[in-house]
Amino acid sequence: MRKNLIVLAFMILSALPTLAQIDLHSHAITKGYLDYIKANGAEMDEGFPIPAWDAEQQIAFMDKAGIQTAVLTMPAPQPWFGDAEAPAAVCRSYNEECAALKARYPGRFMFCAALPLPDVPHALEEARYALEVLGADGIKLATNSYGQYLGEPALDPLMAYLDQQNAVVILHPHKPSSVNAQLIVDVPLASYEYLAETTRTVLNMVAHDVLMRYPHLKVVVPHCGSFLPNALPRFRSLLPVMVKQGMMQLVDVDANLSHLYYDLAGAPTDEVLDALLTITTPDHILYGSDYPYVAEPVLISGKQALESRLASHGLNPKDVFTDNARRLFGENLPLRQYGEKIVRIAEIEVVPEYLEEYMAFAKEVGETSVKVEPGVLTLFSMQTKEDPCKIYILEIYADQEAYQSHIQTTHFKKYKEGTAQMVKSLKLIDVNPLAGMVR
């Protein structure tokens, strides 16, 4: 039995990634946000129903998809209906809920805070609170907030503060300030206007030299760069003409673009990937799911197909799914390189009359630990056929720190205390997996 477990340990270790994957594009739809949107009759403002969302369901999806950490942001529409105080309260509540989720599920969630734009003073106040008090990992900005487009001079005080904070800014398209209502029913916003809207606001930021005036900002552009691969050559060719006519300032387009990152939410086909690589470099491309706006089976199959195709475009899956995000967020990212892994076999003999109760405790602690603790890589339990009371558990931890953290968790302590009288004997055996034993 021990020999078989050691072989199993090596096989599991060989398959484990060095770093887990991160999803740069997902949305938390909290009850407070949704209630406020519905109270103002805006749940169909973006031409598409706001989907149901639940943190546990998202984690279940992430587990199936192989995603360790998701960055949460507020979806569209922007919670602004003319009253300055109410949107500020909605954004404050939303950000506090996201901060609580981040704390409740360590390593599973990060969040980029929502701001009550177009109210710049309240937005600046909320940005300070979110980054300095709540520990937000960045800021989410709508492409436009009821006609106020990114790049406008009115936003300079906010941009200056975010620049001082070296902030990560995640953009997300919202409905343009003026749009044909029937057109967005016939041709959904997400299929065209969202891409045009993102392109519009990024070009406006470049035209106003925002990313050079505030060079410490790191801005994530959604949906595979939207229409930028098509629009930028035309923008470049028109710029000197417009400057000569005194209608635009001269800006360094490439220098501005160097501060942009791109997530792959949407439809990263081979053609889209090739186009995206004409305006950026492989180290600025990141994975995004757009959960919960796309069906889970579609996201999982699409992610698997993407992983298999990246190399043909000169892209390293490890960079796209992990390392680029690690460089972008730096020390804020809960993923980390681990030290030497701990592989251990627990030999346990259970008092017969407690066997069923013990197995329930073991199942609960095993599932919870692997689900919420990034450093717990495997807890694999089995019984001997001859004597079901003899149980072996293969335990693999990312390193000593992860193990020490594990035994201090509430769920482990519950298991330890709850099963104290049920265990007749316990022996922990540290092992070194042997490669030569695997066929």
Image (spheres, rainbow, N blue to C red):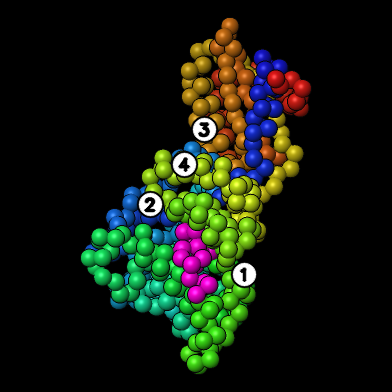
How far is the residue under mark 1 from the one under mark 4? 31 Å
Under tag 1, what secondary structure? loop
- Residue at the location (60% across, 42% down)? 374
**Residue at mark 1:** 258
Which mark sits nearer the N-terminus, 2 or 3? 2
Q: Is residue 15 above or below residue 308?
A: above
Q: Which residue is denoted by mark 4 in the rendering?
A: 300
What's the amino acid at mark 1?
Ser
Amino acid at the residue labelled 3: Glu
Foreground mark, 2 or 1, reads: 1
Quick one: 113 or 244, which is closer to the camera?
244
Q: Secondary structure at mark 3?
A: helix
Q: Which residues are magenta?
A: 220-234
What amino acid is found at the position of numbered circle 2 in the picture?
Answer: Tyr
**Sequence-wise, which precedes: disc 4 or disc 3?**
4
First in sequence: mark 1 vs mark 3: 1
Q: Are marks 1 and 4 in contact (CB under 8 Å)?
A: no
C-alpha gap between disc 4 and disc 2: 13 Å
For label 3, the residue is 367
Q: Position of residue 399 (x, y in %)?
A: 71, 39
31 on left or right of 309: left
* Residue 240, magenta (yes or no): no
**Amino acid at pointer 4:** Ile
> Looking at the image, which residue is at 53% across and 82% down?
239
Residue 432 coordinates in the image, percent (x, y)? 76, 27
Residue denoted by label 2? 293
For image coordinates 50% across by 87% down, the residue present is: 242
